[in-house]
Image (cartoon, grey):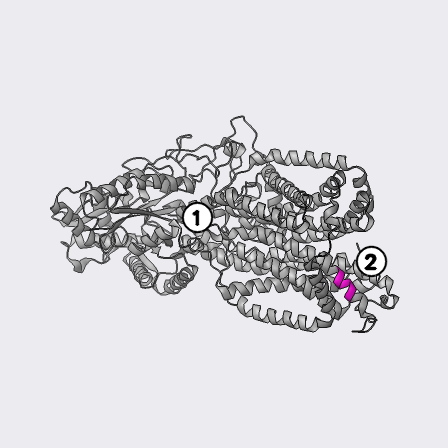
Amino acid sequence: MIKKYVNWLVDHPYRVIFIVTLITLFFAFQLHNLFMILDPKRILPQDHPFVQLNNQIEKTFGGSRVVVIGVSVKEGDIFNPVTLAKIKRITEAVKKVPGILEENVVSIADRKIKFINASAGGMDIRPMMSEVPATKEGLEELKKNLYSNDLYVKSLVSEDGKSAAIITDFRSGVLSPTGSGSKPGSTAGGNPWWNPDGTPDKKNLQPVSPGGEPGSGGIEGDPASKASERGGLQPASPVGGATQAPNKWWNGDKKGASSPTAKGGTTYDVLFGMVNRLIYGSSPWPIGGDNPYWTSDSTIYKKLHSIIDLEKDGNTEVYLGGLPVALSFLEADTNVMNGIVFPIAFVIIMGVLFLSFKSLQGMVIPILTALLSVVWALGLVGLLGIPLDPFTKTLTPLLIVAIAAGHSIQILKRYYEEYAVSQNHREAVRESTLKMAPIMLTAGLVASASFASLVTFHLKTFQAFGLLTAFGILSAVVLELSFIPAFRIMIKPGVKAARETPSSLDRVLASWGAAIPRQKFKILLAGVLFLVISLVGASQVRVNNSLKNQFFEKTELRQSDRAINQAFGGTSTFYILIDGKKADRLKDPGIMAGIEGLQRLLESIPGVGKTQSYVDYLKKMNRSIHGGDPVWEKIPESRQAAAEYLFLYSISGNPADFNRLVNYDYQQAVIWTFLKTDSTDLAERLIKEVEAYKPGHFDSDISVGVAGSSPVTVALNETMVKGKVQNILQVSGLTFVIASLVFRSLLGGLLVLIPVLLAVFINFGIMGFSGLTLGIGTATISAMSVGLGADYAIYFIFRLKEEFKKFSDIDPASKASERGGLHPALPVGGATQAPLESAISKTMSTAGKSILYVAFAISAGCATLIFPGYYLHAEGILVPLAMLTSSLGAISLIPALMAWLRPKFIFGPAKMM
């Protein structure tokens, strides 16, 4: 069948080129549908309890997109009219940024920050700074009032008085459908996978106002987004740019295009849902989550930056910190990757190709094949409506180009070998394609299956990356077995490259190959030693998805974050939800005592900067009622007293002041905890402390749960560790099965797997010894190592089988026995060893040389990832390392194992595919 196809291809090259052109044009037309969503929820495991609770807190209290603005002075302190005016202007300006949760904005200049003092009537409640003080006395009074309330120290003002904070929060933008929506409890299998909120018809979606009227830009059903008594919220409008979906069905197509989800979802949605139901029994993402309609993080950052830039001067520095800021830097670096680093990688790969072939043909044909592969892969993404994220947008095209260009080396090298023998252009194309087709199909199937196995990760980002890369590799294989031979037929052979004399590398590889049978046990012993050392290092690998720590220290993000953390409680959040299960339950003094005790426990742990709860305010009210006596700064003694204090506060204050801390009926409350680091080590300790604290301080019917940016990162870590082990087993199993079937030998599958797994463990070992952590940017390395490393092993074994058959025909004494298993007729040494040495030597100087060029091409391309300022720089180290170890394993361990074991599928009768 393969022979018939190759003969047809050689006889009809123009038809093949025409078909490839049509397919390419079709996929190229789909590129205009590409869009990117920078939504952290696409990364998070939505079925994890921490993530689900975080979503619940977000809908009631907000807090998922906190940005801390730090205003610092170099000389003096902030208590001067100029600096205070800056703080007030910034506070008012941020309330006009699209998507802001106004009731969660707090600063010393905000109306919600009150000074609670004793009065004849009980409590005197007034804004801390309604106007900027103009006199020295007014400034001193403001300073005294602020520092008399420890609620505000380290949260809104620094201890040294040189810095002030404006804490902002932005809505997630879950829009409510006006059409026929899915009911709660339905799965996301039929919904857009990046927005599993049960929205069936994006075309009919409209923002709704707090009052429920369509079109006014509010968000329905989100208490945190309702207008306060003193003014509404700024509506969140969709933002254009790279992160926004184009004006298609998912963004309200004005042409009236029908919504694919109205009929059960896009083709991808349906397939995605089927895959997840097969793997998990149901869709892994229940209803709930975000969509691309929110104000993008980059827009938030730009808007805030434009505000603070107006207030900077020679004595004033203003900093931004928080998750949206980190994500905006991530997006910016993604654009740098695609605009600068990718072209550089492209040029480097072209240089490697030219070095490999020393001809323009050898450079142009592989790079053109690689570009077509990227167009096909990204075109499929656009066709199926899959959103890109920074990980897939940055790494996948580069990886596909490197892999496709690298694999093209194999078939072109083989063409020049055949042409050097026959001096017949058409026959060389025919023979090279015929001999390489089974190898490339096998290698491509293993590599694509390895990446596709990432679909079993319970993380949408990995699923998209795996499927996109798998299709890109399959596209490359199709093009290498169609476009390359057809195009090769249509152009001249390029005789210069075919007639080149053996290089120094050829001679070194040939000598190394001839020596391997004699040195096999030393090589295998070295492999075992590497494995043992690597296992020691692998045991030290830590999982850490700290986004900020993945950026270089020199970046503005890290410098600003450090400045804010030094002055205030921190920019990372850790929330504790207390649920009393019924209204007014949280007015109980016993529950409030439990909350206060938990706050003090958390604040005693290094790394915790500040905690806040509604209990802090009630303690201040109790003190005010008792004439300001510090002795009474404690929890009210009865539920009735607490209710009375809150009633008195509502008369002169505003009940909405507490919206971010407790809900309106005092059934649920949140302890806001600010951390100075987003390290998961600290978050894991806090989670354990909260779990240990609950039993002795809260009744059994009181629910206490943790959420926030730090706990959801812990959830991500737990999912990744479980998924990583599962993925290694899956990829190894797939590789073993495919290789065993192709070689018709279980030993053949094992021989492919051994050097590949060694490469994986060496990678993990170096990560452990060097301190590189397992995170979003490094978790896919094992799939890459196995998928691409298996390619090298397969190429080598196929060629070794072919070469041994040739040399065995010359030396009949070395022909294989028919008895199966390991070959019994080839003792070590003696005359029968010559064919094996010759076969390994020849394989090393042909397939082995190509393997090194392929590994170098992929490594050189991916090494450019070292230069961006964010987490993919680790990939720039680990991918080349994986290619180095995999390729060296293929050309060292495999021939050594062959020389030792002498498997029948190599030394016996040739029974391939």
What kind of residue is marked 2?
Lys
Q: Residue at x 61, y 48 (%)?
A: 351
Task: Assess whether residue 840 is covered by the magenta stretch.
Answer: yes
Q: Which residue is mark 1?
A: 55
Q: Assign a secondary structure to mark 2.
A: loop
C-alpha span from label 1 to label 2: 57 Å
In the foreground, 358 or 181:
358
**Overall secondary structure of the magenta section:** helix
**How many residues crowd mark 1 within 10 Å: few (<14), some (14–19), many (20+)?**
many
Magenta extent: 837-842
What kind of residue is marked 1?
Asn
Furthest toward the right, the residue is 812
In the foreground, 199 or 446:
446
Q: Which residue is mark 2?
A: 911
Residue 425 in percent (x, y) is at 79, 43
Could you tell which of marks 1 and 2 lies nearer the N-terminus? 1
Pair 1/2: label in front: 2
Residue 871 in percent (x, y) is at 48, 53
Q: Residue at x 34, y 54 (%)?
A: 562
Q: Residue at x 65, y 54 (%)?
A: 853
